[in-house]
Image (tube, helix red, strand yellow):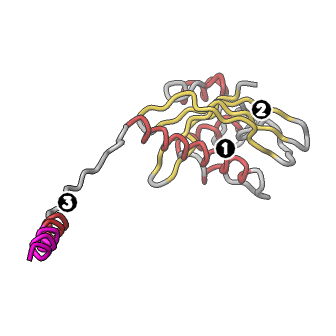
Amino acid sequence: MKTVKILFAFNFIFFFAYAAPIKNTVVSNYNPKEISFDQSELAKKWLIKSVENFFKQEFPDMSKITTKSYNEYKTDAMNIDMGTDGSLTMEQFNKKWKKKYDVKYVGADGFLISAQDWGKVTVSKCDLLSSKDKTYVFQVIIKDVTYKGTYKRTIKVIESGKSFLIDDVKELN
């Protein structure tokens, strides 16, 4: 009889121990800086891939990876004093764009690199300089391995929908 009481006591303890509701304690490691960091990492990966893929195309189209405003700005810059319909003089260009972009760094030769011909183009450096309000600024070195060109750029990338777009490229050399 004593053994039955002991077994009954053990069953009673186990039953109520397992039947008791389990408290779900979720440890949250939410840190807004980490979320922002993750987005900047995504922006960085997108930028590297977009630049390298741009130069792999036979007929690259910068409008696919730039904002509409930057595309118009850069197109205007590449057509300064061309004497074609819609081309601007340097004075007209500066007046039109100086409020939105730092016009002294526009570069009028091409998009991302100043060469008209290129070989294998890679991004050898892409460091985040700043991040604010879904805007990321990167210090970038683009290299043309084939023609031995090195191009230092500061590139501003903004979030656009589920992806990113280039909104400014400062050509530093």
Depicted 122 relative to depicted 13: above or below? above
Q: Which labelled disc corresponds to residue 22?
A: 3
Query: Disc 1 or 3, which lies upstream in sequence?
Result: 3
Query: Which image quarter is the N terminus in?
Result: bottom left
* Cβ atoms at labels 1 and 3 below 8 Å apart: no
Tag 3: amino acid:
Ile
In this view, the residue in front, 172 or 3, is 3
Q: Residue at x 71, y 51 (%)?
A: 54
Tag 2: amino acid:
Tyr
In three-dimensional space, the C-alpha distance between marks 3 and 2, rounded to whole angstroms, equals 60 Å
Foreground label between 1 and 3? 3
Q: Residue at x 25, y 51 (%)?
A: 25
Drawn side of residue 140 relative to residue 29, left or right: right
Query: Which image quarter is the C terminus in?
Result: top right
Query: Disc 3 or 2, which lies upstream in sequence?
Result: 3
Label 2 crowd (10 A; few <14 / some 14-19 / many >=20):
some
Based on the displayed image, in which of its 4 quarters is residue 169 positioned? top right
Helix, strand or loop for disc 2: strand
Say which residue label 1 marks.
Answer: 85
Percent position of residue 122, x then y: 77, 44
Is most of the magenta stretch helix, strand or loop? helix
Drawn side of residue 19 relative to residue 43, left or right: left
* Cβ atoms at labels 3 and 2 below 8 Å apart: no
Helix, strand or loop for disc 1: loop
Q: Residue furthest front?
A: 1
Helix, strand or loop for disc 3: loop
Say which residue label 2 marks.
Answer: 151
Q: Residue furthest right?
A: 147
Foreground label between 2 and 1? 2
Query: Disc 2 or 1, which lies upstream in sequence?
Result: 1
The segment highlighted magenta reads 1-12
Foreground label between 3 and 2? 3
